[in-house]
């Protein structure tokens, strides 16, 4: 596809600006409130090929099917959005089958009535449909509400969440849907879900509910099949499958060496080798993490909404992502400086660091076999120069990247200092982004076969 054709297709995508703006606004407000309580530590970035797009899609209630469907057709971006277009949500299938439980609870505040009309609990997913009346004349960017699940409820300690629910007008009625994947270790047959909406359509208030839900009939298939890979000292156990009325859930356990966190991406293939669902990472819930003297053990639940697996033979294809612990590199570091995981083949070597009062220039090499554009994108978005180990304003300087030798995989990163410094070597530290580059270079593991009767 030509660059011009790609640009034309991209321009035709119906981007939901209202929801996007609201998500950003809510994030900024929440960030300000948290900063007033305690300044959080700077978080390491997880860089993927579409950066911001992926970060905005993590919240399932924010994904709008029409937007995801359109984005899934675009080259390059499609691999990120396709899982959402394929799986949509559990509520779609539940609604089609008319399996939701009628609730009809109403809460009123600030002249706005919120009604929970029905709810569902399928597999590991709970959800509810809302309607709103008494809505003020609102702008498009505030057609949403902020809600909290399980707030203050000791029964669900550790699973509390604050999310955004987007409303749209259908036949003159404001409708919204909340959907949430449970992170409990043991799923219950009946639960009462406390929920508080704290802001609706830009109006702050308190709309409180406690919704009783009975889980729909499910089928559980126990496997406990282990895929072991000694080369990476990692094993993945497919524990069980939960077959719901409108969703499919997999539970699996990852065991890896202590000190390096391991992430797993999954794809599902049918008996003919045809892919059913690609890369479910976005919908994976960490249920429980434990550590031994030598191992880190993580139990995870992977939920595929709007998909009920049929009888047959399948294989799960795991992709291992390793997140090694990396340290900030002082500019006085003796060279060459090697960054290498004991379990991952990717390595990075810093061969030269030159400093002036205005610039820091770093030359390095990597053995990555990715395309030059991919490497440059990874490094440009995950290599930073920091003033101090924890700069008070969180400022990070990104580099201008140049390829010195494409065959030898050598690069030069040039950081322009915001102000002249007589002692840049003592004031600045380098964060190479090696850990993020490794995380974005997944390794294929042995497929896990299983059968659904």
Image: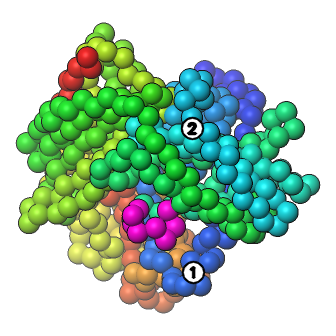
Residue drawn at 48 percent across, 54 percent down: 192
136, above or below 30, in the image: above
Query: Which numbered marker is on residue 101?
Result: 2
Q: Nearer the viewer, residue 391 or 366?
A: 391
The residue stretch that appears in magenta:
149-157
Left or right: 246 with respect to 328?
Answer: right
Mark with earlier residue (2, 1): 1
- Residue 371 in percent (x, y) is at 40, 37
Looking at the picture, tell me which residue is in the foreground, 320 or 156: 156
Q: Are marks 2 and 1 in contact (CB under 8 Å)?
A: no
Residue 386 picture location, percent across and down? 45, 76
> Residue furthest toward the bottom?
422
Is 135 left or right of 316, judged from the image as shown?
right
In the depicted structure, whether residue 452 falls above or below residue 249? above
Q: Name the residue: 57% across, 80% down.
A: 35
Q: Secondary structure under badge 1?
A: helix
């Amino acid at each position: 596809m030509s660059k011009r054709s790609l640009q034309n297709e991209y321009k035709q995508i119906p981007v939901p600006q209202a929801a996007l703006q609201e998500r950003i606004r809510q994030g900024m407000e929440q960030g300000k409130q948290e900063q007033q309580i305690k300044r959080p530590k700077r978080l390491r970035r997880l860089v993927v090929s579409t950066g911001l797009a992926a970060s905005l899609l993590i919240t399932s209630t924010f994904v709008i099917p029409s937007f995801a469907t359109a984005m899934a057709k675009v080259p390059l971006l499609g691999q990120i959005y396709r899982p959402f277009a394929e799986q949509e949500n559990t509520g779609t299938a539940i609604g089609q089958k008319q399996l939701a439980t009628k609730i009809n609870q109403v809460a009123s505040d600030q002249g706005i009535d919120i009604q929970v009309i029905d709810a569902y609990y399928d597999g590991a997913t709970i959800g509810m449909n809302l309607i709103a009346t008494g809505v003020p004349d609102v702008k498009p960017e505030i057609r949403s509400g902020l809600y909290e699940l399980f707030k203050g409820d000791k029964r669900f300690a550790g699973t509390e969440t604050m999310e955004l629910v987007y409303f749209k007008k259908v036949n003159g009625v404001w409708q919204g849907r909340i959907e949430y994947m449970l992170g409990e270790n043991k799923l219950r047959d009946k639960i009462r879900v406390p929920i508080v909406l704290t802001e609706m359509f830009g109006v702050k208030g308190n709309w409180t509910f406690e919704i009783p839900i009975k889980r729909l009939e499910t089928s559980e298939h126990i496997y406990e099949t282990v895929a072991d890979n000694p080369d990476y000292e990692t094993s993945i156990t497919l524990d069980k499958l939960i077959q719901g009325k409108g969703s499919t859930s997999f539970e699996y356990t990852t065991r890896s060496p202590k000190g390096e966190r391991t992430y797993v991406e999954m794809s599902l293939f049918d008996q003919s080798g045809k892919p059913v669902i690609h890369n479910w990472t976005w919908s994976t819930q960490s249920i429980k993490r434990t550590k031994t003297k030598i191992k880190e053990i993580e139990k995870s639940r992977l939920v595929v909404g709007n998909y009920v697996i049929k009888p047959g033979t399948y294989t799960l294809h795991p992709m291992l992502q390793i997140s090694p612990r990396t340290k900030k590199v002082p500019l006085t570091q003796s060279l060459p400086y090697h960054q290498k995981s004991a379990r991952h083949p990717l390595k990075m070597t810093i061969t030269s660091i030159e400093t002036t009062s205005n610039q820091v220039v770093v030359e390095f090499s990597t053995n990555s076999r990715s395309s030059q554009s991919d490497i440059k994108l990874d490094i440009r978005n995950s290599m930073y120069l920091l003033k101090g180990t924890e700069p008070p304003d969180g400022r990070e300087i990104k580099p201008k990247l140049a390829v010195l030798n494409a065959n030898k995989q050598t690069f030069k990163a040039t950081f322009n200092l915001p102000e002249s410094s007589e002692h840049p070597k003592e004031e600045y530290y380098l964060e190479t982004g090696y850990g993020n580059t490794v995380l974005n270079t997944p390794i294929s593991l042995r497929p896990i076969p299983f059968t659904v009767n």
